[in-house]
Image (cartoon, grey):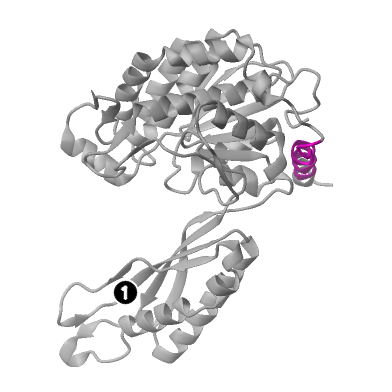
């Protein structure tokens, strides 16, 4: 048996332990656990952290950090991790920044936030040329929205330390890079923790939505190439004819209707060709966005698209090819909905005043873990608004609720003396 297969079986076995427990058989009284002195101490610490959270967000969110250029922001997050007392703070090549509260079991609960921003956010930051600012219950300015989740994670970690937690499982807090360009930071983090992680928690909001499954998302660039020419001498073949035929046939594929129950979608959003009226272009391209909860359906769509491109190429004399842009895997783990991980998160959401909506179609860093059979959830919900616009903002109250969700969930999952796994 190969090492890879051994690791896969180990992860699937852990997932089985973690997810196979039906709620009636393991009906922990989460409400009672959240009324213990430790949980109350965590809540009190977060309740008094508002000024620290504002200071952190202004410092972190104000750093220009488009995907692939997160090093300065990683340095700032690492400095805060050291200041609040996390152990073994490191910055990896990605660059991911990781700190932890050591446990006794050799296992880990891994919390994740996103370090990078959209390119448009970076452009607005440079144009603004001013730091973020607090206006009432908001932190305003480009860079505030996504970074609020990193601040929530740091405030939660600080609250756990202030409360004096001594966890059974290590609590790992990771800001991951390149979420916007292929989940590369998460891929590296997963490789580092795949054998030790009991669960991954992707912090995206206050838990108004809890994702326990992941939708697959494949982005392709479809490129057409043919002879250029002036209008007077051009005629056919023309790349635009091939693009038009291909786009029409792809939109006519039956998969979105046939597999609607699996949230299957096909979208073509961008078409690019030519620059002047009187020349036919040599190249053209269009985007292709395929999504489904079923990876086999995505693969089937891709096979059909290749057949379409081959036929169009033969009919028009235009070469056509698919170039991958971002292939995000999806997945479902049996029993996830009734797992202790999800039920604990539900209980915490209600504790902090949120009525959670559960779904099996998350789309973020959690996809990497779930696609490989490792238990993971994504905490979605409110965090602000206008992301990607000059007037972007983060909601102060949502940021603290997110901190409370992460901190209390860490307490419930990591305080596991006497249990085989956090799911037991």
Decide whether the magenta segment is chiefly helix, strand or loop. helix
Question: Residue 230, percent across and down?
Answer: 18, 85
Q: Residues within 10 Å of mark 1 (few under 14, many from 20)?
A: many
Q: Can I make out residue 92 in this image?
A: no
Question: Residue 111, percent across and down?
Answer: 56, 29
Question: Residue 423, percent across and down?
Answer: 74, 32
Q: Is residue 167 left or right of residue 359?
A: right
Residue at x 78% of width, y 47% of height: 5
Above-or-below relation of 291 to 98: below
Q: Quadrant of residue 223?
A: bottom left
Question: Residue 29, percent across and down?
Answer: 71, 25
Q: Nearer the viewer, residue 289 or 188?
A: 289
Above-or-below relation of 57 to 18: above
Which image quarter is the C terminus in? top right
Q: Quadrant of residue 77?
A: top left
Q: Secondary structure at mark 1?
A: strand
Q: Can I make out residue 277 in this image?
A: yes
Above-or-below relation of 223 to 110: below
Which residue is label 1 attached to? 283
Residue at x 47% of width, y 37% of height: 204
Residue at x 34% of width, y 24% of height: 57
Bounds of the magenta segment: 8-24
Q: Nearer the viewer, residue 144 or 219?
A: 144
Q: Is residue 333 left or right of residue 256?
A: right
């Amino acid at each position: 048996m190969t090492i890879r297969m051994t690791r896969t079986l180990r992860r699937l076995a852990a997932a089985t332990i973690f997810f196979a427990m039906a709620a009636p058989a393991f009906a922990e009284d989460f409400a009672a656990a959240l009324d213990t002195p430790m949980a109350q101490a965590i809540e009190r610490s977060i309740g008094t952290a508002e000024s620290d959270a504002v200071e952190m967000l202004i410092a972190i969110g104000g750093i220009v950090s488009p995907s692939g250029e997160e090093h300065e922001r990683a340095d700032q997050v690492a400095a805060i991790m050291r200041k609040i007392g996390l152990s073994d703070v490191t910055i990896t090549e990605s660059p991911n920044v990781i700190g932890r509260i050591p446990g006794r079991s050799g296992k880990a609960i891994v919390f994740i936030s996103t370090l990078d921003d959209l390119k448009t956010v970076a452009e607005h930051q440079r144009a603004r040329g001013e730091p973020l600012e607090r206006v009432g219950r908001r932190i305003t300015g480009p860079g505030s929205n996504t970074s609020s989740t990193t601040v929530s994670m740091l405030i939660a970690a600080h609250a756990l330390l202030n409360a004096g937690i001594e966890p059974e499982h290590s609590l790992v807090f990771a800001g991951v890079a390149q979420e916007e360009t292929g989940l590369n930071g998460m891929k590296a983090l997963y490789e580092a923790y795949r054998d030790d992680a009991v669960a991954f928690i992707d912090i995206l909001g206050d838990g108004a939505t809890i994702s326990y499954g992941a939708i697959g998302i494949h982005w392709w660039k479809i490129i057409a190439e043919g002879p250029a020419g002036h209008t007077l001498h051009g005629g056919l073949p023309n790349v635009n004819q091939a693009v038009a035929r291909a786009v029409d046939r792809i939109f006519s594929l039956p998969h979105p209707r046939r597999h609607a129950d699996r949230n299957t979608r096909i979208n073509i959003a961008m078409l690019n060709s030519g620059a002047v009226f009187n020349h036919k272009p040599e190249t053209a391209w269009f985007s292709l966005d395929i999504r489904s909860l079923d990876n086999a359906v995505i693969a089937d769509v891709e096979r059909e698209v290749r057949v379409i491109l081959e036929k169009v190429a033969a009919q028009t004399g235009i070469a056509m090819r698919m170039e991958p842009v971002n292939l995000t895997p999806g997945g479902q783990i049996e029993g996830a909905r009734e797992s202790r991980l999800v039920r604990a998160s539900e209980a915490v959401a209600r504790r902090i005043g949120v009525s959670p909506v559960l779904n099996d179609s998350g789309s973020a860093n959690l996809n990497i873990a779930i696609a490989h059979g490792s238990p993971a959830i994504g905490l979605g919900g409110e965090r602000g608004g206008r992301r990607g616009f000059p007037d972007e903002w983060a909601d102060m109250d949502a940021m603290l609720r997110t901190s409370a969700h992460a901190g209390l969930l860490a307490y419930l999952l990591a305080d596991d003396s006497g249990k085989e796994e956090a799911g037991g």
